[in-house]
Image (spheres, helix red, strand yellow):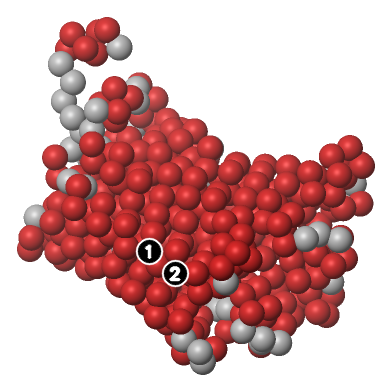
Amino acid sequence: MRWLILGLLFCISVVTYIDRVNISVTARQMMPALGLTDQEMGWIFSSFVFGYAIFQIPGGWLGDRWGARMVLTIALVWWSCFTAFTALAPASSLSGILGMVGALALIRFLLGMGEAAALPNFNRAVTDWLPPDERGLGIGIAIGGIGVGAAVTPPLTAWIMVNYGWQTAFYLSALLGMVLAVIWWVLARDHPSSHTWASMDQTIPAQSKFERQALSVPWLALRRTPTVWWLVLSYSCLGYVAYVYMSWFYLYLVNVRGFDVLVGGQFAAAPFLAILLFCPVGGWATDRLVRSHGLSRGRRIVGMTGMFLAGASIGIGAIMESPYLAIAGLSLGAGWLYFAVGAYWSSTSDLSAAHAGTLSGLMNMGANIGGTLSPTMTPWIAHQWGWRASLGTAAFIAVIGGILWLLIDPGKGLTKIPNHLLTNE
């Protein structure tokens, strides 16, 4: 049953990134067809990330309160609808009211709002279904679906776009999400104790839905725990770099490196195939290191290693003259970036398993604040100083994220708050 739950989360992860990345490919036809500039397309990209960022905490809190089964089902239906609406926006009355850019930005914002519930509820499900020393691998597998979704999207979307038009890519993505929502609702449950197919694992404490509803979020403890804020800041650095790949990598290959539309779509899959491999390996590595070196050190080694090597690989890829060596370096950068992901997400469960959804939502909000800046800053820096400078900035930010791991100590848990402060709060 654990593998079934992880498999379903993996599939949902694939769909989230199909729905997220397809617009970066269809932009090749959308921009000339709708008369959009690079900067306007950047605003549309960023509107998704903005909605995704600000609803991370509510999405995680809902998972802590109502369980991942219900919240993920509703979220899948929601964002699938707005994926389809992306294709309808230019001809809709909304475009007449807000203008083309405003209508697309609003729809992408609402799509991001729905997808915001995905990853925090992955963490909620992993925390509920796996014991602590397996959660790094579990979240690594779940989030590793990003690699498949983002890898298949560029070549597949490019082929659909060339043969059937860019709108069709959004309709098919929406249909896939709706089908998966039904499958998740039928097969998933919130905890082994509530699934008729599962035997209860004694290493996973049982917790009823009503007990979860009674838990209040310890906001004062979160505010007074330094590790929480260093974790958020470090993951913001990861988010900035990740969205360079999500938003601009395909267009970088086609417009800057000179690849054909379809060939560029094939090579644009390379970073995401690296993510598919490196993400679960990083999760497995942090679990093993926790057993041999302790919780905080086991998380820190993987987090720092991933971020440092990501920065080095991106920096090397940016300066390579050969487009193929550049792709290799930048793809390794994406892989190492997601090698660190298991350490980040497991650390939120380590801090407080009962509030894993809310804590990971807070952390992922930080990532997507960084991600909101990335789609617009990347072309602006490239326009001012060139693409080497733009990618070099991303490499530097990754290294900063690695350095911040020196201050992250999930093994201490949340700061204990005296009773008199809790009363005042």
SS type, badge 1: helix
Residue 353 falls in which quadrant of the image? top left
Residue denoted by label 2: 392
Discs 1, 2 touching: Cβ within 8 Å: yes
Quadrant in the rendering for residue 51? top right
Q: Position of residue 359 (x, y in %)?
A: 35, 38
For this rendering, which residue is in front, 238 or 94?
238
Residue 250 screen position, x and y as percent: 62, 74
Q: For the point 78% across and 60% down, which residue is it?
A: 37
Question: Residue drawn 16% across and 65% down?
Answer: 288
As drawn, the label of residue 396 is 1
Q: Is residue 125 left or right of residue 254?
A: left
Measuring 54% from the left and 51% from the top, which residue is drawn there?
Answer: 373
- The residue lying furthest to the front in this view is 385
Is label 2 in a helix, a strand or a loop? helix
Give the percent coordinates (x, y) of residue 271. Answer: 48, 76
Q: Quadrant of the C terminus?
A: top left
Residue shown at 24% from the left, 62% from the top: 304
Q: Which quarter of the figure is the N terminus placed in?
A: bottom left
- Residue 28 horizontal side relative to residue 417, left or right: right
In this rendering, would 244 be left or right of 423? right
| Pointer 1 local density, CA inside 10 Å: few below 14, some 14–19, many at least 20 | some
Mark 2: which amino acid?
Answer: Gly
Residue nearest the viewer, comparing 74 with 219: 219
Tally of numbered tags: 2
- Kindly report the distance in space between the C-alpha atoms of the residues bearing marks 1 and 2: 6 Å
**Residue type highlighted by circle 1:** Phe
Residue 221 appears in the figure: yes
Q: Is residue 61 above or below residue 332?
A: above
Image height of 398 relative to 320, above or below? above
Taking the image as drawn, is residue 198 in sight? no
